[in-house]
Image: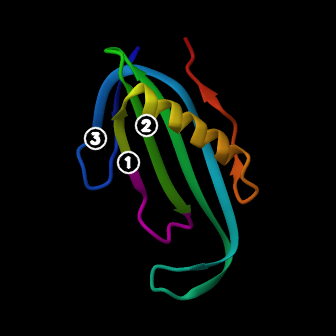
């Protein structure tokens, strides 16, 4: 078990003690993008979303997502919340659907190391 303090956009960090269950990056690459001024630019733009699921020391579950772009054309965002077991199962199913999406490139699964 370890202590976590996960960032959340426009909110306080989500803090708990627990273990990572699984984490995975999903990427979408484009050859054109809008820069921060709203101008169309040619060049590689990569949007990456990281989804992570945790189990807390007190038996709860945590969902956390963090999104970012390269080049940084918009601010990073992060959301996180405590979940019930039913919500946790839905989050696992959603991650599995993303893994099979032809529009996204799924990175390797990361699991807890004990």
- Residue 49 is marked as none
Query: Which of the marked residues, 3 or 2, is nearer the chain's N terminus?
Result: 3
The single residue placed furthest to the right in the displayed view is: 102
Q: Quadrant of the C terminus?
A: top right
For the residues bearing labels 1 and 2, Cβ distance under 8 angstroms: yes
In this rendering, is residue 25 above or below 111? below
Magenta region: which residues? 70-78
Image quarter for residue 103? bottom right
Q: Quadrant of the N terminus?
A: top left
The residue mark sitting in front, 3 or 2, is 2
Query: What secondary structure is found at the residue carrying circle 2?
Result: strand
- Residue 13 is marked as 3
- Label 1, on which residue? 79
Asked if residue 43 lies left or right of residue 90, the reply is right
Residue at 63% across / 49% down in the picture? 26
Query: What secondary structure is found at the residue carrying circle 3?
Result: loop
Label 2 crowd bin: few (<14), some (14–19), many (20+), radius 10 Å: some
Image quarter for residue 94? top right
Percent coordinates x, y for residue 12 in the rendering: 23, 44
The residue mark sitting in front, 3 or 1, is 1
- Label 2, on which residue? 63
Label 3 crowd bin: few (<14), some (14–19), many (20+), radius 10 Å: some
How many numbered markers are drawn? 3
Residue 77 is one of the magenta-drawn residues: yes
Query: Is residue 56 or residue 90 the one in the foreground?
Result: 90
């Amino acid at each position: 078990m370890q202590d976590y303090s996960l960032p959340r956009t426009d909110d306080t960090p989500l803090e708990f003690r627990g273990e990572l269950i699984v984490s995975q990056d999903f990427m979408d690459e484009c050859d054109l993008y809008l820069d921060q001024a709203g101008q169309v630019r040619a060049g590689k733009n990569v949007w990456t979303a990281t989804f992570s699921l945790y189990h807390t020391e007190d038996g709860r579950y945590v969902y956390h997502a963090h999104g970012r772009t390269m080049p940084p054309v918009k601010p990073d965002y992060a959301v996180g919340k405590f979940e019930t077991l039913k919500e946790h199962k839905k989050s696992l199913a959603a991650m599995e659907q993303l893994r099979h999406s032809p529009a996204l490139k799924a990175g390797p699964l990361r699991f807890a190391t004990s």
